[in-house]
Image (cartoon, rainbow, N blue to C red):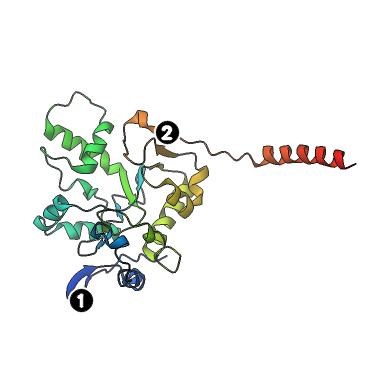
Amino acid sequence: MKNPWIGVVSRDYNGNKIIVAEDDWEYIKQFIERKSYPSKGDPKYALKLEVYPQHFVGDIQHSSVIFLSLNPGYDQFYENDYKSVPEYANKIKNNLELNSTNFHALEFSTISKLGYWGEKLQDWIIDKDLKDKNEILTSLKTITKNIALAEFFPYHSISYDDRCDKLAGKDYLPTQKFLFDIIKNRIKQNDVKIILTRSFKRWYEAIPELKNYENCFEVNNPNKPSLKPKNILKVTRVSVESEINTLLNELNKEVQTQEQ
C-alpha cells in the first residue's frame, strides 16, 4: 500500500491554509461541511487542520515498542511551540514519509518542561538517581530511539469526536489503513511490544490481530494513562472456543435426553 502521507502540502480552504492528506481530503471535507460540525457545536471537537498531522512518531517500522493512543491533542502550549519552531512541521513530514525515525514528540521538551510524553516516559529511565534535568532529557532521547507512538486518528483536536472513528463511508481513512497495515505487519513479524494507552476497543476493532498477540499490553487506566511498569498489564486473550463448544455439547445432551 502506498504511503498516503508522501507529498502532503497545505491547501487553501475558505481562505485558510489546512494540511490534509490528499487521499483523506474528500472525507474530511464532507465531515467539516456538515451542519452538525463540530460535534454539538462545541469548538473543542473541531479538527485543527492548520497544523501538520502527527499520525505516528518515531521509527514505526522497526522500533522495539509502539504505544497506541487516540489522536494528537492540541492546546495553547502546543500552538505556541509549533509556531515558534518553523522547522517542526518538516520534522513531522519527514517522519510520516518514513524518511526520518526521530521521536520528535520530545522536540519541545526542555529541562524545565518535559512535555506530555517526556513526563510519561520518565518512568522508563532505569537510573532513578538522575537529578540533573539535562541528564534526564538526554536519557529520554536515548530510549526513544527504540520507541514509536501511533495515533488511531491522525488529525489534531482539543477533544476527540467519536464521529471521526470511520469517516470514509463508514470505513477508516486511507491514512488510517496505511498505519494499521504497518502495525499488522509488525505483529506478523512478532518483533515488537505494543502497549495500548487509549481507546482499546477502537484499536482491537481496527486491528483484530492485537487481541491474541502475545506481546500486546494495556495500561490499567486508559482515561489517565500511566506508563509506570506496575500500571502496564499483560492481557491474556487465549481463545476458549473449544471449551465452550464442549460445554454446549454437554448442555445439549441434557436437552436431548429430556426430549427422549
Q: Is residue 219 left or right of residue 46?
A: right
Residue 149 drawn above or below residue 111: below
Where is mark 2, residue-wise? 233
Amino acid tagged 2: Leu
**Amino acid at circle 1:** Asn
Q: Can residue 99 be seen from the camera position used here?
A: no
Q: Is residue 146 left or right of residue 91?
A: right
> Residue 148, percent across and down?
31, 47
Instruction: Please tell me whether residue 139 is drawn above or below residue 24 in the rendered image.
Output: above
State the SS at label 1.
Answer: loop
Above or below 199: residue 49: below
Q: Position of residue 80 (x, y in %)?
A: 11, 54
Q: How many marks?
A: 2
Quarter occupied by residue 242: top right
Q: Are marks 2 and 1 in contact (CB under 8 Å)?
A: no
Pinpoint residue 97: horizontal percent, then vertical percent. 29, 61
What is the distance, in whole Å, between disc 2 and disc 1 at their CAs? 47 Å
The C terminus lies in quadrant: top right
The residue tagged 1 is 14
* Residue drawn at 42 percent across, 38 percent down: 217
Q: Nearer the viewer, residue 173 or 194?
A: 173
- Residue pushed farthest right? 260
> Residue furthest toward the top?
129
- For label 1, count other residues whose C-alpha is less than 10 Å away and answer few (under 14), some (14-19) or many (20+): few
Q: Nearer the viewer, residue 216 or 255?
A: 255
Q: Label 2: state its secondary structure.
A: strand
Marker disc for residue 129: none
On screen, residue 155 versus residue 106, left or right, reads: right
Quadrant (top left/top right/bottom left/bottom right) for the N terminus: bottom left
Please state if 116 lies on the left or on the right of 32 as rendered: left
